[in-house]
Amino acid sequence: MSEAKEKITDAELEIMQVLWKAQKPMTLTQIKAALPGRNGDTAKTLLRRLCQKEAVGQEKQEVYYYRPLVGQEELSCYRVSKLIDKLYEGSAKALTAALVRNEKLRRQDIEELREMFEGMWEEEN
């Protein structure tokens, strides 16, 4: 992932989420309609920045259409990894413990994760 893509702001992330959800190229008008809390100039500025960061591509037809160049899973994994490095010295275990302590990870979640891990380990063997 390029350095520019690493620096997607929370405001820019809102635009990315709209594009990911749509799963097709969108016009500025369509993007603005999906962001009722943002004015048109702000959305346009955020799109321009995302294009400069190579996180969004634009294609000129009768108007410009925008599409994500960075996948949601790719960006999520990167951001989680950076969070773990920054706040938990690279320890996913410490992050998980914090999630449990703050009641963000319930017993049912833990059980589902256990089943997922067991399935992954079985596939490896």
Image (tube, grey):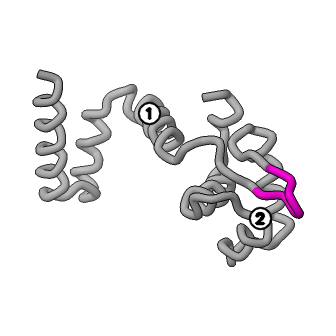
Q: If the image is split into quadrants, where does the N terminus sit?
A: top right
Residue 37 vs 51, above or below: the answer is below
Kindly identify the amino acid type of the residue bearing the numbered disc 1: Ser
Please provide percent x and percent y for residue 3: 67, 28
Residue 81 vs 38, above or below: the answer is above
Please provide percent x and percent y for residue 90: 38, 26
Name the residue located 63 percent from the left edge and 59 percent from the top edge.
24
Crowd around label 2: few <14 · some 14–19 · many ≥20 (10 Å)? some
Q: Which mark is residue 110?
A: none
Kindly identify the amino acid type of the residue bearing the numbered disc 2: Thr
Name the residue located 53 percent from the left edge and 41 percent from the top edge.
75
Name the residue located 18 percent from the left edge and 33 percent from the top edge.
120
Q: Is mark 1 on a helix, strand or loop?
A: helix
Looking at the image, which is closer to me, 60 or 125?
Answer: 60
The image quadrant of residue 71 is top right
What residue span does the magenta drawing correspond to? Answer: 59-65
Q: What element carries label 2?
A: strand
75 on left or right of 80 = right
Q: If the image is split into quadrants, where does the C terminus sit?
A: top left
Residue most extreme to the top:
125
Q: Name the residue under label 1.
A: 81
Residue most extreme to the front:
61
Looking at the image, which is closer to me, 67 or 51?
Answer: 67
Residue 9 vs 6, above or below: the answer is below
The image quadrant of residue 37 is bottom right
Q: Which mark is residue 27?
A: 2
Q: Mark 2 against mark 1, which lies toward the viewer?
A: 2
Looking at the image, which is closer to me, 100 or 114?
Answer: 114
Looking at the image, which is closer to me, 5 or 103?
Answer: 5
